[in-house]
Image (cartoon, rainbow, N blue to C red):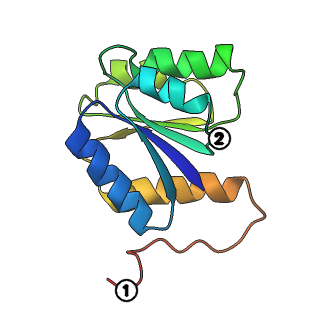
């Protein structure tokens, strides 16, 4: 599964990228919605994980760009934010393929959600979520 991660906090972006790579995912990084938009001009992804509040092009506007301009209505979005208010969640919850997590969510919760999304697109099989092997 190829995942685009979008976050203006470079440290958080790098940590998320490293964690998801350790779980075997292919990861593409973008530092804001504008860079993510440019990335999608040349890259195909199966899932987008995006911060909500970013300068230049925030997560919600980037989401609208992907859905409306690109017509990519089937790419699941996982939004995350340090602000977990109901208002933030309502901004980003568009449909059954959009999800919201707090930035403080444990990595197992993030990976578990990604696995549920991945397996919902594949034939049913047992999903085991745990730390990467060899660690």
Q: What element does badge 2 sit on?
A: loop
Tell which of 103 and 42 is nearer to you. Answer: 42
The quarter of the picture where the N terminus appears is: bottom right
Q: Residue at x 23, y 35 (%)?
A: 9
Task: Please say if the residues under marks 2 and 1 sit with CB atoms less than 8 Å apart.
Answer: no
10 sits left or right of 97 in the view: left
Q: Residue at x 23, y 33 (%)?
A: 82
Q: Pick whichever, 85 or 119, lies toward us.
A: 119
Mark carried by residue 134: 1
Percent coordinates x, y for residue 44 in the rendering: 65, 41
Quadrant occupied by the C terminus: bottom left
Report whether residue 128 is seen: yes
Residue 106, horizontal then vertical, whole percent: 29, 56
Residue 93 appearing in the image: no
Front position among marks 2 and 1: 2
Compared to residue 31, the image places residue 68 above or below, namely above
Q: Residue at x 44, y 67 (%)?
A: 23
Q: Position of residue 59 (x, y in %)?
A: 42, 23
Q: Nearer the viewer, residue 39 or 111?
A: 39
Q: Where is residue 40, by image quadrant? A: top right
**Vertically, is 1 above or below 64?**
below
Q: Residue at x 60, y 51 (%)?
A: 117
**Nearer-N-terminus badge (2/1):** 2
How packed mark 2 is, by other alpha carbons closer than 10 Å (few <14, some 14-19, many 20 or more), is: few
**From the viewer's perspective, is 71 left or right of 14?**
right
Q: CA distance from mark 2 to mark 1?
A: 29 Å
Furthest residue toward bottom: 134
The residue singled out by tag 2 in the image is 44
């Amino acid at each position: 599964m190829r995942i685009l991660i979008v976050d203006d906090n470079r440290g958080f972006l790098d940590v998320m990228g490293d964690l998801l790579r350790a779980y075997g995912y292919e990861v593409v990084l973008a530092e804001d919605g504008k860079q993510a938009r440019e990335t999608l001009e040349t890259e195909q992804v199966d899932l987008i994980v995006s911060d909500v509040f970013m300068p230049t092009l925030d997560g919600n506007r980037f989401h609208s760009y992907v859905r409306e301009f690109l017509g990519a209505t089937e790419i699941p979005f996982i939004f995350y934010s340090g602000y977990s208010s109901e208002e933030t969640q309502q901004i980003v919850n568009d449909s059954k393929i959009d999800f919201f997590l707090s930035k403080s969510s444990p990595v197992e919760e993030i990976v578990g959600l990604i696995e549920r999304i991945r397996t919902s697109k594949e034939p049913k099989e047992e999903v085991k979520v745990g730390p990467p092997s060899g660690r």
